[in-house]
Amino acid sequence: MNPVPTAPILDLSTCDREPIRTPGSIQPHGFLLTLSDSLEVLQASANLGDWTGCGVREAIGQTLAAVIGDSAVRRLQPELAAHLGPRPHYMGTIGAPGGRYFDVLGHRWDQLIILEFEPVDRAEAADFRHLYPLIGDFMLKVNEASSIESIAESACQHVRSVTGFGRVMAYQFDHDGHGHVVSESLAEGYRSYLGQHFPASDIPAQARELYRLSRIRLIQDANYQPAPLVPPLNPVTGKANDLSFAALRSVSPVHLQYMRNMQTMASMSVSLIVKGELWGLISCHNEGPMPVAFEQRTACEQLGQILALCIESREDARELQFRLDLRRIMVSMLAGLTQGSDFIENLSSVSPDLLRFARAAGVAIVVDGRILTYGDTPEHEDIEGVVEWLAGHDHGDIYHTDKLSAVYPPAAAIVRNASGLLAMPISRIHRHYLLWFRPEFVRTIEWAGNPRAKEQAAASLTQLSPRTSFDAWRETIHGASMPWHSGEIELALEFRTALLGLALERAEQMAALAEELTRSNKELEAFSYSVSHDLRAPLRHIVGFADLLIESSGSEDAELRQRFLKNIKEAARLAGKLVDDLLSFSQMGRAALRPTTVDMNDLVAACVDKLAPEARGRKIEWDIGALPKVRADPTFLHLAVFNLLSNAVKFTGQRDPAVIRVSAEDHAHETIFHVADNGAGFNMEYVHKLFGVFQRLHRMEDFQGTGIGLANVRRIVERHNGRVWANSAQGEGATFSFALPKVQPE
């Protein structure tokens, strides 16, 4: 064993900025050469002579064969001719001058060919056959394992059996870089760290990044004396060599002292990469120096990759199930939000689901100064303060924290039920919020040593004393809630989008309703005026002629009394017709549609037959084209077409001959029908009045009618989701058109 080196004075405040990729030296349990493409030796580690008998100064500028021998170069030549990548590649086992054998690893990096030579006791190539039963046995254990922890424990046991390390731990990093030992396998006499945490400062960010890039790292002896590279700078770049992927790369003296303080003389780390990120490590410790041959390291690296895939698979399955459960709750809530007309009351009605959705203890809905709460929430004045604070800061579409008091100091008074907050604005204009509260979750973290001590000592240059102790140190966390899951945040954003969509849809419905009410009010005004006007005339006639009839009661003029009675009867008939048409118009808006397939040729023919009494004695030319079948309520559609044809007959009364045409147009999504005549027509300036109740564009003395027929046509067509319009030139006839969609609601 090498003598324990004198511990240098170490500046702990700079350990996260150490040049760990460019240490300028290697671990001395092997030697390193850098080569040009012509296999000229450009650099060598200072310990070259200890392993080959060729001094480092003699080797620089020589061919590779001059240093390791012709037979060794011939053995490596096929691998050297192949494409070398950035990761070390096993090139074979060679014999070198002096009778020693070496496993050779090669890779191309930093514009150099880098060869590493590790001594072995065998002359034959590395044997990887034991790798397959190891992996096969591990895969069987994986299938039986029920959790990530149990899979990791099996991996630790397999790694320890392959390497002989006394302690093997599976170590997971959290989002802050702190490590947590989730599984371990121990030899007798080794201390357990299971369940303990290691602060992020133990493995700084730059070291974690290097673990992500280089999947395995071995330190055979923490007391080693580094072997520097000669010359010290890369001859191609003029800078210190980047040894990121070199297996023999020397490590930080801070880390070596850390190992010695932990009574660990040898260590090996295998990176666990999940979805391209460093999930954790398989970390191996031994109380004495521990060589690990390349084939053993390869077996452990492969096992680590399989473990990482298993972790990814289990986490994906767990994440998927979690998100599916949340989505089911969200769908249930959205279904409940469509039930009533009051959006806020609807939100209140799904309060239990709101709590389950965010795994919260309390929820508050803040709208227009109203605060509706459910579950365990702060007082209303405290909620108002939180909303005021949220409104004063741009938190985007959603805000979440598991320690509200750290960012909003007044929340220190409400940590019991509001240590965590998930806040979601539910309006783009108003100060409306949906707030979820999580209570304080007091928890104790067991650290392997006091993580605060290192922070306290970092201000001064000191021996690595802050981590001389790895005794369990417990820290109790107050004022924080359970953290919010990324799935909860993402689905809360989806929920917000859906809420805004519902609110927008409700606003559009209200706008449409307001528009419909405005139109209905106008119709009602016209209706009231028309009813009072049109009913007043026949009623006045009835009263007037009844008075005349009374006055003439003593008269012997029977013909006069007969005329009075006839006028009374005609006025009563007209009043009755008005009432009947009003009743029919009212029914158009209430009766249920019963769509079926309607042959328009048969329907128009039936209407023409029904109009025969009105057309008697007149010359009417009916020009009826080929009409398609449509899907509609046959009773209502018959009434609409009859009204249009009846109008055409009525307004062509002064034409000889009268010409009435019925035609159709077939389009992709609708069928259009036209009823055209050569009658009186109308002034297009007043076309907007045409389909209103009691709207007439001609004097009753010229063309009799109640003015309800076209209003009925419009209502019937619109009930079928269609549209109706008219075109005319006064004195030259008119064309009334309506369109029916090809897909009708059942």
Image (cartoon, grey):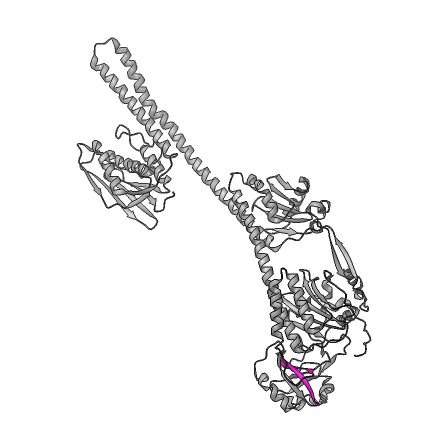
In the rendered image, the vertical position of residue 239 relative to residue 523, given as above or below? below
**Residue 337 % position (x, y):** 53, 43
Which residue is at 27% across, 29% downward? 704
Give the residues drawn in magenta, as a range.
97-125
Classify residue 388 as left or right of residue 498: right
**Residue 726 % position (x, y):** 31, 40
Residue 414 seen in the figure: yes
- Quadrant housing residue 188: bottom right
Query: Magenta segment, principal secondary structure?
Result: strand
**Residue 106 % position (x, y):** 63, 80
Location of the N terminus (image quadrant): bottom right
Residue 110 forms part of the magenta stretch: yes
Total labels: the figure holds 0
Furthest-top residue in this view: 554
- Front-most of residues 324 and 651: 324
Classify residue 440 as left or right of residue 499: right
